[in-house]
């Protein structure tokens, strides 16, 4: 049964006082109700109208969590009602087949195959599952960067305390000269004892994109596995996990894919599935089945259904179109501020090294004062970053952001930098 018919059937199955059979039978794809728009400025205007945005500040902090556009939210609410009508019947009869369908849609979106993909609750779960489930032995070595995300670094510290693993920590420059500089930075720390390298696909505090494929190729030549933290990448820009040939990849879908909170992606290369211990044990003894690593107990299953709606929505926009827009928004403000006195852009200038996220600091102001002033004086919400050689505010606009809002941000920064 194709997705459209499946969803219609799913609607037709349900009768409840809360949501009538008639209403449910009308459940469609999100994109069924969205017009095809060729004109770009019309498209972004329409997309903005899909969001309920606060009027008292400009949100330039979508990096933590992407709020959901109303067309997806409406479908989520229907899914919550549907699962609530069906209860255990849904869990016993529908859950598995729906989850498998969503996994195959997700696999297609990220350029991989269903047998290597799982749905988790977030990037933390996906990545910490790999770090904690890796078959560590005393004296093994791991490599990661100062600029990596806190909870993964903390899991490596725990692994070090628990198994006697030695962690080697590099520092990724904010403005690398070329890919080779990054590759050799990681390579310089490899020894005969190195077992795993963790890298960010996109560093969350600066938006810098790392040369994942080249790092994997180098690491594999030493027999070292690579785990990629792609928390900010799925739904943000176009790429194929299979093309990277990495061993493990984790992402949060509630960031740039705009799914409901509590959705993540786990990728494990099929040759590595039997190597990892599960986070939560289950009865699946097939060492080659990724589902063995993906048991999470009873959870909000309506979220899984809404992932499908988010994928449909992003396909309606066009993944490449979204990537182009995100990069345009970042470059719109960063190019206008790059040469302003006292301004430091902490995001690389080369186009392929960044997308929608950027970081800007001021020589005459601390990051926290900058973020507070932006919020209190100019009604612009950002987040201050002050660690790992990055001093500034992370700026993460979204598909709903207008250039008028960015103009206000640019004027605000100029005023702060020059007075
Ligand atoms: C680079 C990076 N990795 C991992 C995470 C963890 O994401 P989550 O809290 O959704 O698990 C984040 C969150 O911001 C992040 O920026």
Image (cartoon, helix red, strand yellow):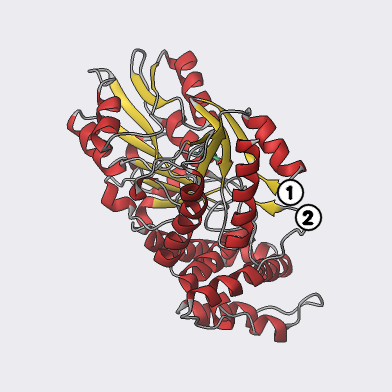
- Work out whether residue 51 or residue 134 is closer to the camera in this orientation and state it: 51
Mark 1 CB near ligand 1 (8 Å cut): no
Q: Position of residue 127 (x, y in %)?
A: 46, 37
Under circle 1, the secondary element is loop
Residue depicted at x 45% and y 51%:
118
Asked if marks 2 and 1 touch (Cβ < 8 Å), the reply is: yes
Q: Which element carries disc 2, helix, strand or loop?
A: loop
Q: Residues within 10 Å of mark 1 (few under 14, many from 20)?
A: some
Q: Which mark is residue 403?
A: none
* Residue at mark 2 to residue at mark 1: CA–CA distance: 7 Å
Residue 148 x/y as whole percent: 47, 31
Q: Please, is residue 308 above or below residue 240 in the view?
A: below
Q: Which mark is residue 56?
A: 2
Residue 176 place in picture, x, y as percent: 33, 34
Disc 1: which residue: 379
Pick whichever, 199 or 17, lies toward us: 199
Q: Earlier in the sequence, mark 2 or mark 1?
A: 2
Q: Which quarter of the rendered picture does the C terminus lie within? A: top right
Residue drawn at the location 50% of the way across and 57% of the way down? 329
Determine the quadrant in which ligand 1 lies: top right
The structure residue drawn at horizontal position 49% and vertical position 45%, both measured from the top left corner, is 231
In x, y percent, where is residue 49?
66, 72
């Amino acid at each position: 049964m194709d997705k459209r018919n499946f969803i219609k059937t799913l609607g037709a199955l349900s009768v409840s006082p809360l949501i009538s059979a008639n209403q449910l039978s009308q459940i469609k794809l999100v994109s069924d109700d969205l017009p095809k728009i060729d004109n770009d400025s019309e498209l972004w205007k329409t997309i903005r109208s899909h969001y309920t945005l606060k009027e008292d500040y400009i949100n330039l902090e979508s990096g933590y969590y992407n709020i959901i556009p109303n067309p997806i939210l409406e479908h989520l609410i229907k899914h919550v009602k549907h699962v609530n009508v069906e209860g255990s019947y849904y869990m016993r009869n529908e859950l598995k087949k729906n989850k498998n369908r969503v996994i195959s849609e997700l696999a297609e979106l990220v350029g991989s195959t269903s047998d290597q993909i799982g749905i988790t609750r977030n990037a933390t779960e996906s990545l910490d599952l790999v770090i904690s489930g890796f078959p560590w032995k005393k004296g093994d070595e791991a490599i990661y960067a100062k600029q990596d995300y806190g909870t993964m670094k903390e899991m490596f510290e725990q692994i070090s305390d628990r198994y006697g693993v030695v962690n080697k920590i590099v520092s990724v420059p904010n403005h690398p000269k070329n890919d080779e500089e990054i590759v050799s930075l990681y390579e310089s720390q490899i020894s005969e004892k190195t077992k795993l390298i963790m890298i960010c696909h996109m560093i969350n505090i600066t938006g810098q994109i790392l040369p994942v494929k080249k790092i994997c190729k180098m690491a594999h030549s030493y027999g070292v596995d690579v785990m990629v933290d792609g928390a900010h990448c799925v739904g943000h820009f176009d790429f194929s996990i299979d093309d990277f040939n990495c061993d493990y990849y984790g992402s949060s879908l509630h960031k740039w894919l705009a799914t409901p909170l509590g959705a993540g992606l786990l990728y494990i290369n099929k040759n590595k599935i039997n190597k990892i211990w599960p986070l939560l044990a289950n009865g699946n003894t097939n060492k080659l089945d990724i589902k063995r690593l993906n048991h999470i107990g009873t959870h909000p299953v309506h979220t899984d259904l809404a992932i499908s709606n988010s994928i449909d929505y992003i396909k309606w926009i066009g993944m490449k179109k979204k990537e182009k827009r995100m990069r345009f928004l970042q470059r719109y403000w960063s190019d206008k501020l790059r040469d302003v006195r006292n301004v430091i852009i902490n995001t690389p200038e080369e186009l392929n090294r960044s997308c929608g996220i950027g970081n800007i600091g001021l020589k005459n102001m601390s990051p926290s004062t900058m973020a507070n002033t932006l919020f209190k004086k100019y009604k612009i919400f950002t987040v201050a970053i002050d660690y790992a050689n990055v001093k500034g505010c992370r700026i993460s606009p979204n598909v709903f952001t207008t250039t008028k809002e960015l103009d206000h941000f640019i004027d605000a920064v100029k005023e702060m930098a020059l007075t």
